[in-house]
Amino acid sequence: MSPVPLVLGDLGNGRKGITPAYGQTLAEAASVCLEEQGHTSPTEMQVSGHFESPGKLEWNIPSDQSRRCWNDDGFATEQGAYGIAALLVEHCGLEVVLRSKKKTGFDFWLGSPNEDNTLFQGLARLEVSGIRNGDASTVDARVRQKLKQTNPSDGKLPAIVVVVEFGSPIVKIVEK
């Protein structure tokens, strides 16, 4: 199976629920995280769970200014994971269409890139988490934690959890 292309710079084109400026910000955060873990572009990323395929991550080399801006490891990891998750769900026929409100238990609403998605029809919830450096058991534990976190908003709409680990790098995507 050939690797799924995940070109971080493409986030700079924006999406329904991601402005071009924010998309570029997410790409920059992810590139800093990947470089800090010793990766060079392009790098293969293992993707498992609901969607299984190798991914081929490509990014621009971050500048010294970018590294200084993204010096907060936790914030950079979270934002970088958002970017990779946004690209990955597109290979499942979905797109980030709306940022969720605080205290909902998830980060974004997903929908079809070709539909209006009015009245929450055809939408899914996306919860994302990033790990700067861990292993498969750390990723699995985080997936369980994030699945539980989406419980308060359970209803008729599915939830998708994406956990991005930058050290290996690996991603696990699970739908509930």
Image (tube, rainbow, N blue to C red):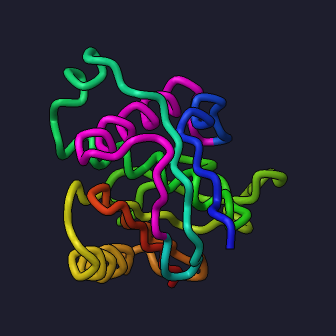
Residue 31, quarter of the rendered image: top left
Q: Residue furthest top?
A: 65
10 is higher (above) or lower (below) than 118: above
Whether residue 123 appears in magenta in the rendering, the answer is no
Residue 105 drawn at (x, y percent): 35, 66
Tag count in the figure? 0
Residue located at (16% from left, 35% from top): 72
Residue 29, quarter of the rendered image: top left
Whether residue 41 appears in magenta in the rendering, the answer is yes
14 is higher (above) or lower (below) than 102: above
Pick whichever, 103 or 141, lies toward us: 141
Is residue 164 toward the left or the right of residue 137 in the image?
right
Residue located at (55% from left, 68% from top): 54
Residue 71 drawn at (x, y percent): 17, 30
Q: Quadrant of the N terminus?
A: bottom right
Residue 104 drawn at (x, y percent): 38, 62
Residue located at (46% from left, 80% from top): 154
29 is higher (above) or lower (below) than 123: above
> What residue span does the magenta drawing correspond to?
17-46
Is residue 81 toward the left or the right of residue 134 in the image?
right
Residue 135 drawn at (x, y percent): 23, 73
Residue located at (56% from left, 55% from top): 56
74 is higher (above) or lower (below) than 54: above
Residue 62, quarter of the rendered image: top left
